[in-house]
Amino acid sequence: MTTASVAEGPAPKRLIVVGSGIAGLYSALLAAEAGAEVVLLTKGALADSNTYYAQGGISAVLDEPAPGDTVAAHIADTLKAGAGHCNEEAVRVLCTEARLDIAGLGRFGVQFDLDDDGDPALGLEAAHSAPRILHAGGDATGAGVAAALIRTVLDFQAAGRIQVIGHAQVTSLSLGGPQGGRVVGANFLHDGRHLGVHGDSVLLATGGAGQLFAQTTNPAVATADGLALAWRVGAAVADLEFFQFHPTCMVLPAAAREAEGNNDPLLISEAVRGEGAILLDATGLRFMPDYHPDAELAPRDVVSRSIALHLAKLGDPNGHVFLDATVIEEQRGRGFLAKRFPTLSKRTRQAGVDWTRQLVPVAPAAHYWMGGVVTDLYGRTSVPGLLAAGEVACTGVEGANRLASNSLLEGLVFGRRAVEGFLGSTNGVPLRANSAAGGLAFTHAAGTPPADQQDASSHATTALSGPPELPVVDSGRPLSGPPELPVVDSGRPLSGSPAPLDDVAGYVRSQSAESGGFSRQALRRLMTARAGVLRSGELLGEAAEALGEWESGVLPLNVPDSLDVREHEDANLLLAAQLLVHAARERRESLGAHYRNDSVREPAAVEEFDKRYTMSRKASLVHD
């Protein structure tokens, strides 16, 4: 890329985007459109992301919404799902600007499903008060959106507007600037070499960390890479105790379930329960009405917890229940499932289940991490030069429990806002929100913003022109001050009476005792048994002890001096596990997706029970 597109102007700013889900692809396209140099790094192929597996859709109140629906209603639904823990201003931004970024997707070739009148077909999902869910290809929304964005990114690459580097495992972030505290680049593994690229800012869009758990809807690439990268350079993280488990992930045969990687997760969308599917236990009992008045249509954390509680009551906490979709076929007619859920119909058949006649074995699976790297409303983290968007970020939108179909929307809205922050358009009057539909303003992309739109934390210290150079990086270069995990007093007593799950906890301990050194499977079993859907102070303390024993072998705070991608992923996963367990131990009361059977709400702390727990390597846990 040359400076010809910005004739006689200063050198264009360079944005390094890490990740190729909806937040990474969309933000890369917007930045490139605005005239910035963009380097897009993805650890696998462009399609290797959580976005690709998303079935549910994207929530948005459009210019012509469903009857009775309003932006205010979307805001209210999001706040309610978040259990009072959301950042209300972030929620307002998300819901108000949603329609603008839906239009932005249209510019990049995304086509949503239409109804018989040619209007957007709006679906209804659990915890939404009105139909406002857009789908693409029925139950393959993520794949449809990702495919369109990837095609456009490849077009931009062919035109020299984006440089894509695939199979690039980012291992560390480079620090520079006058005080050495600004992120100025990324180091990565590629084709067996340590390489690096410098830029004005790095945008983390790396997704989540489902591989922390034995059962997950996430692909193999979801190994907490972005969280670990940010933590190691001192960025603040928050809300890590809130991990959403999707209640109905198909349980694979034992051999496949034990295989490393869990490469082909099959989430059974809650839209299937919305059409009338029910949950049965091994005896054929429909049990959900005993746990919640909304039965199978209760919020997903309630359904997940109810399944876990019921399995524990049956003495099989690591077992599964069954989804009965045959009732839908009976009620709606032969062929309805294949028409309404073509992808699920195909994939259940591939897994050996004809769900028009047979029950589907399902269990709760790690699905979405509400917490992450703390950002403001323009994707800026606590470290200058470092931006974050999508699941890796913690904007406060999701609160303690994500509202269904808000996650893809968050990646869009705050991915675009992160680009606006990068372009220097947030000091004073922001770029027009509807620029997503018509392209971001070109004004500041060609170089450093005008003096009246700069500050020390938002403008770049260097601007490189020409095609990005990839010099070999010295893998032995030390990071500035190794971060330290906060120390927890594991012996801190809990007040209040224990809940009647103590016998369950004992059973879990007896069935999941770990032996030997660290392995992916051991980590997943540990986190599932002690820090999964059901938690207690005792189980979390045991998890912290086991993780601490593994720390000396894996060294999660360090960047491995290795060309083996798995070693880097292992370090990232162990670090993420330690941070999650620490946050879960600190939050002693149940809230949203964080459920403790020994939940305590001390009278003196009632006013602050829903405050955010924030951690960084520079300080111990604090309230903010």
Image (spheres, rainbow, N blue to C red):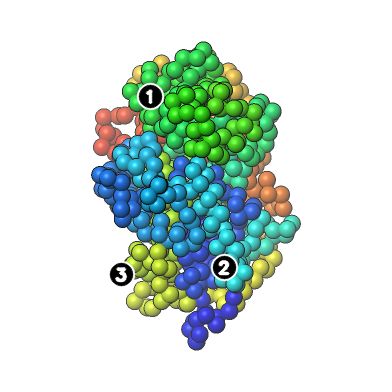
Q: Which of marks 3 and 2 is in front?
A: 2
Question: What's under tag 1, amino acid-wise?
Answer: Ala
Mark 2 belongs to which amino acid? Phe
Q: Is residue 234 above or below residue 323?
A: below
Q: Tell me the crowding category of disc 2: few under 14, some 14 to 19, or many 20 or more residues within 10 angstroms, Cα based.
A: some
Return the residue nearer the eye: 65 or 488: 65
Q: Residue 428 carries which label?
A: 3
Spot occupied by residue 260 in the image (x, y as percentages of width and height): 67, 36
**Nearer the observer, disc 1 or disc 3?**
1
Q: Mark 1 to mark 2: distance in Å?
A: 48 Å
Pointer 3 local density, CA inside 10 Å: few below 14, some 14–19, many at least 20:
few
Q: Considering depth in this image, is 13 or 301 the residue closer to the camera?
A: 301
Tell me which residue sits at (56%, 63%) in the image.
153
Q: Earlier in the sequence, mark 3 or mark 2?
A: 2
Tell me how far mark 1 sits from mark 3, CA to CA.
49 Å
SS class, disc 2: helix
From the viewer's side, name the closer residue of 552 and 170: 170
Quickly name the residue at label 1.
Answer: 295
Seen at 38% across and 29% down, the residue is 297
User: Label for residue 156?
Assistant: 2
